[in-house]
Image (cartoon, rainbow, N blue to C red):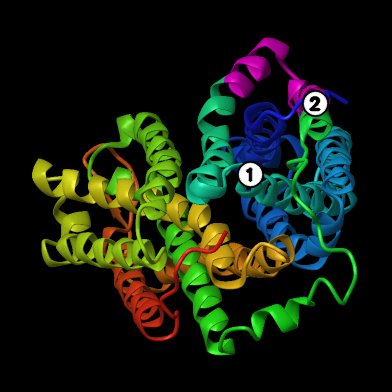
Amino acid sequence: MINCQNKWIRAAIPALLLHCSIGTVYCWSIFSQEIADYVGLSKGAIEWAFSFAIFFLGMSAAFLGNIVEKNIHKSSLIATICFSLGMAGTGFFIYYGGLHQGSVLALVGIYIFYGFIMGIGLGTGYLSPVKTLMLWFKDRKGLATGLAVAGFGAAKAIASPIMQAVLAGLGDGGLYKMFYILAAVYFIMMFVGHLLLAKPADWYEPQTKGEKPGILETLKTRPLTNYIGIWLMFYINITCGLVLISQEKMIVKCVGMAGLVGVISTISAIFNTAGRLVFSAWADKLKDRNTIYKLIFILSIAFTALVLVTNGIEKGSQNIVLALLMLLLIFFVNAGYGGGFSNIPALLADHYGMSSISAIHGITLSAWAFAGLSGNQMATWIVEKFGKEITTAEGLTVNPTGYQYVLYAMIVLYGIALLLSVTLVRPTKKKT
């Protein structure tokens, strides 16, 4: 172990190594169709692997938060092993599915390794550096956590072109080999992060029950409705983000920009990452960190309403201004989605202190688990039930009316989140 007390070496760099690795879970959508074709299964069946990964991310964070609280080295090692094993196991079952087309065993194996095992690595890996960062950056907790989750958000933008280049270089049958390579690379990155990660030498971690109250006792320091409000507004912000992000590609096609899908996806990822940094750094300067969530919800409602009033999705292909308004909505929702993630640990610390923050943050991430299951599926259901498919001038089949209804659902949800933020989440001064 390196014997030094430097906040960048002991906190920021290991956090980025861990989060830039596990954040590549979002690259699944890039290869899901290729995987489905390779193993002879439907894309819909394969997509559930990602939903399970996000679900078990949230649930493992909720149930393993105490382990992270007690020993970040144990939790970061669990994250390293589970994430790498999940990648390698996914590669094996893709290989098996290629030999046995349509195999249920291959599908179940992918679910177990990419969904369950890798999900445990995601949850423990996401939590492990967060408290450590806030301890090192006591006066800039928001910026500190923003740095970590920015790595998670930026991972897709950074890794996607690299993965595609590796896949092209491997040629036919290289899909499963790529997962083996990723497993090795991410094991090295995460293991280095695990070795470097350390809390400040002057931090005293309460160990006994008398010194350290349980999670329920900590939550009772404020009205229970306060925590319910935080959990629900966090859940809604993630759900709305996933609703739009999961349909981003088709909405861009609806407004006549099919040729720019890749470019717009990259810009969205940049806004997602920037939102994690900007909103969290901004919140450090505010008396009440919850003000950031109010701003995110108000601006999201305003942008969504503007697109709805102008009928931007249906008319965007005929009017460049309306198309640009739709893109602004996509970019801002991505920024607000990222900002919601980066601010939640610091907001919880402001309300409940640092002693049990990993465990409380872990429980709160269960909102991510349920949003991972509900967001994509809700958007898909709305598009299937409302509107009708049309053929664009480019020969693409789209359902712009259906996506307009998706925006109606989003604006209602954002309105509920704003109401929760204003009425249930109590104002608080920042704690150290």
Residue 331 percent across, percent down from the top left: 32, 46
Q: Secondary structure at mark 2?
A: helix
Residue 391 percent across, percent down from the top left: 28, 49
The answer to if 166 sits in the magenta stretch is yes
Q: Is residue 404 visible?
A: yes
Which mark is first along the chain, 1 or 2? 1
Tell me the residue at 81%/55% (across/down): 68
**Circle 2 sits on which residue?**
192
The residue lying toward the viewer, choosing from 401 and 351, is 351
Disc 2 to disc 1, C-alpha distance: 17 Å
- Dividing the image into 4 quarters, which one contains the N terminus? top right
Q: Which residues are magenta?
A: 162-189
Q: Is residue 189 above or below residue 330?
A: above
- Dividing the image into 4 quarters, which one contains the C terminus? bottom right
In the rendering, which numbered label is found on residue 247?
none
Answer left or right for 322 relative to 56.
left
Instruction: Say few, some or many: other residues with alpha carbon within 10 Å of mark 2 (under 14 / 14 to 19 / 20 or more).
Output: some
Q: Which residue is most to the top?
A: 169
Tell me the residue at 29%/62% (across/down): 300
Q: Is residue 197 above or below residue 357?
A: above
Answer left or right for 314 relative to 59.
left
The answer to if 232 sits in the magenta stretch is no
The quadrant where residue 191 appears: top right
The residue lying toward the viewer, choosing from 346 and 123, is 346
Q: Secondary structure at mark 1?
A: helix
**Circle 1 sits on which residue?**
133
Residue 254 percent across, percent down from the top left: 27, 48
Residue 194 percent across, percent down from the top left: 81, 34
User: For the residue marked with disc 2, what is the amino acid?
Assistant: Val
User: For the residue marked with disc 1, what is the amino acid?
Assistant: Leu
